[in-house]
Image: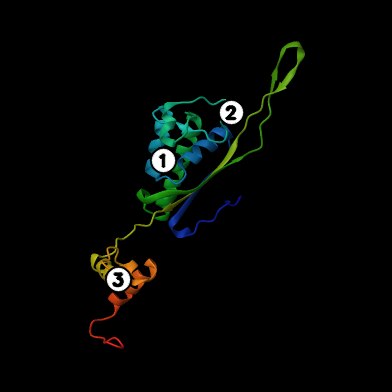
Amino acid sequence: MVRYSLDPENPTKSCKARGSNLRVHFKNTRETAQAIKGMHIRKATKFLKDVTLKKQCVPFRRYNGGVGRCAQAKQWDWTQGRWPKKSADFLLHMLKNAESNAELKGLDVDSLVIEHIQVNKAPKMRRRTYRAHGRINPYMSSPCHIEMILTEKEQIVPKPEEELAQKKKFNKQPQMPYNIDVPIRSSGLRPDRAIFGYWLFQAIPRHVELQGS
């Protein structure tokens, strides 16, 4: 069995799924996989179903030679996009497989997030096509390998209000006054030094007697 290119940080809270030598275009599948990377499993499933119905598009960011522009790509801050139906169907089947693996391990399916997804090139399959004047040209297919790792998303527990209020109370620092009614120029000091001296005088407790007073 071929190992995965990435090991999950917490194997007990993760599930895996992979497919090898899948008869689906590598370039289309790679772009579709990048679109759902980091998504919640329910959101990714809905997105792939919308791609098959042409309600949402897949942005083509790397392999976009000759790819036309579409208005649906604006939500991805991109201009070029397509609807690779076969790639979406394959990824839907893999998500369903990963969901079954998560249920077998006793994980919470509703909190799964696609932490890692990778598409690699598989060995090309060779065929031939016959052309005019007795020529023969290659007629290749570009299959791919797909692997994905889904992880339970940790729920962030908010801090209690008492702890936040106590933290704000101890972090309170004296602020330097900006509106100072002190004749700075008549004192003969530089303005920055005069302001610092006034702030230092205000910071001294009232019950402490100054020397020479």
SS at circle 1: helix
Give the spatial CA distance, label 1 vs label 3: 50 Å
Residue at numbered disc 3:
174
**Label 3: few (<14), some (14–19) or many (≥20) C-alpha neighbours in 10 Å:** few
Please name the residue shown 40% across and 34% down the image: 75
**Label 2: few (<14), some (14–19) or many (≥20) C-alpha neighbours in 10 Å:** few
Q: Are marks 3 and 2 in contact (CB under 8 Å)?
A: no
Check residue 44 in the rendering and tell me which mark sits there, or answer none. Answer: 1
SS at circle 2: loop
The percent coordinates of residue 165 (x first, y second) are 25, 67
Three-letter residue code for mark 2: Gly
Residue at numbered disc 2:
65
Three-letter residue code for mark 3: Pro
Please name the residue shown 40% across and 44% down the image: 41
- Taking the image as shown, residue 141 lies to the left or right of residue 38, namely right
Q: Toward the viewer: 199 or 30?
A: 199
SS at circle 3: loop
Q: Is residue 118 visible?
A: yes
Q: Looking at the image, tell me whether mark 1 or mark 2 is earlier in sequence order.
A: 1
- Taking the image as shown, residue 2 lies to the left or right of residue 105, namely right
The percent coordinates of residue 209 (x first, y second) are 26, 87
